[in-house]
Amino acid sequence: MKKSWFLLFLILSVTVHAQYSVRLVVTDIATRPSDDVYVAGNFNNWNPKDENYKLKPFGGSRKSVVIKDLAAGTYAFKFTRGGFDKVECTADGRDIEDRVLEVTADVSQEYTIKGWKDDYPERPKTYTATPQVKIIDTAFKIPQLNRTRRIWIYLPKGYATSGKNYPVLYMQDGQNLFNEKTAAFGEWGVDECLDTLQQKLSKECIVVGIDHGRDKRTTEYNPYDHPKYGIGEGKLFADFIAQTLKPFIDSKYRTRKGPENTFIAGSSMGALISFYAVLQYPSIFGAAGIFSPAFWVSPKLFDDAEKFSTSSIPRFYLYAGAKESPTMVSDTRKMADILQKKERYVLRTVINPLGQHNETYWRQEFAGFYKWLMGNN
């Protein structure tokens, strides 16, 4: 009997931890077939020129790449020629949705690339920010990192005439929040959403958007060193928001200054640094919107959350899509379980079974987050 149970345990262990190989084959490349082609996806942090994911000749005009040791799950990806300015597109130059592959066994899949984005003249993007959105500074000083950054601000419609003080939400990836013209993959539409919601709820809020640091984004949003991505600068970046940017905003605008009125939010790596900021500054940030958090980049945050203790009442809104990375939902639930055990913490966890890792889905979820943030569940 013991032997049978042991064999069953081994079988279950192998099944749970099974790793698969996936071969992606491109059978036809519409233009520039002699150029190098790469695959970028949620399995390599969307790196558009990762030499480990470069396609190789595979008989005739075909090219392929073998991705090994993939856990079962849903993977999103696109083909590039070394950059997202050279990403695949439709035959008439329009953007395409992420390709999605469900992995449950070893598989070989064939694809056709119909066009490349750089083969088509760049279409001017529309300026979509509402009049409530202003740029505070195109080169706001980050003394902790000796860098500068563009900072945006959204002021409620009644700000100029009301004389009221307002709560403040600080958000990462400012390029993608308000303006289609500056958003590489589409905007959140925060300003349009709030223009409508604040009228319905009669609860208004200032939103401060902080641009990401482009090639510095991964390190600035990561609190800890990473063997692939480099030295983590997240602590210094969180210090910047709490010790430099917030005091500036409080001095220039009519704000409510306590943690019950100061919030922070972001997606992916931006969710990571937003979560970390609450752990570091619970007396400043009282609530956080954690959209599709990249906890797999910095698993030490699970330990930090276990040890985290505060006399305040922090609130966390955790969102994950089931069509993102294989561990997105499980990691989010793991963090939710840790926080749920704490006393006095307020927690909302949302899992979207159709959610993918992009601005379209974060935009859809923002209204629900804002209602929760303002106490309209």
Image (cartoon, grey):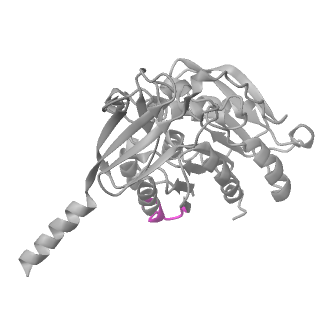
Looking at the rendering, the stretch of residues picked out in magenta corresponds to 338-346
Q: In the current view of this chain or complex, which residue is farthest to the bottom?
A: 1
Q: Residue 29, percent across and down? A: 47, 30
Horizontally, residue 335 falls left or right of residue 363, namely: left
- Asked whether 222 falls inside the magenta stretch, the response is no
Residue at screen point 52% across, 42% down: 277
Q: Quadrant of residue 96?
A: top right
Question: What residue appears at the point 82 percent right and 42 percent down from the top-left corner?
Answer: 156
Quarter the N terminus occupies? bottom left
Between 65 and 71, which is closer to the camera in this rendering? 65
Coordinates of residue 67 in the picture (x, y in percent): 31, 41
Residue 298 appears in the figure: no
Residue 157 as seen in the image, left or right of residue 88? right
Q: Residue at x 44, y 52 (%)?
A: 328
**Residue 324 rendering spot, x and y as whole percentages:** 48, 50
Q: Position of residue 313 (x, y in %)?
A: 57, 58
Between residue 342 and residue 194, name the one nearer to us.
194
- Relative to the observer, which residue lies in front, 344 or 124? 124
Q: Up-down: is 346 above or below 141?
A: below
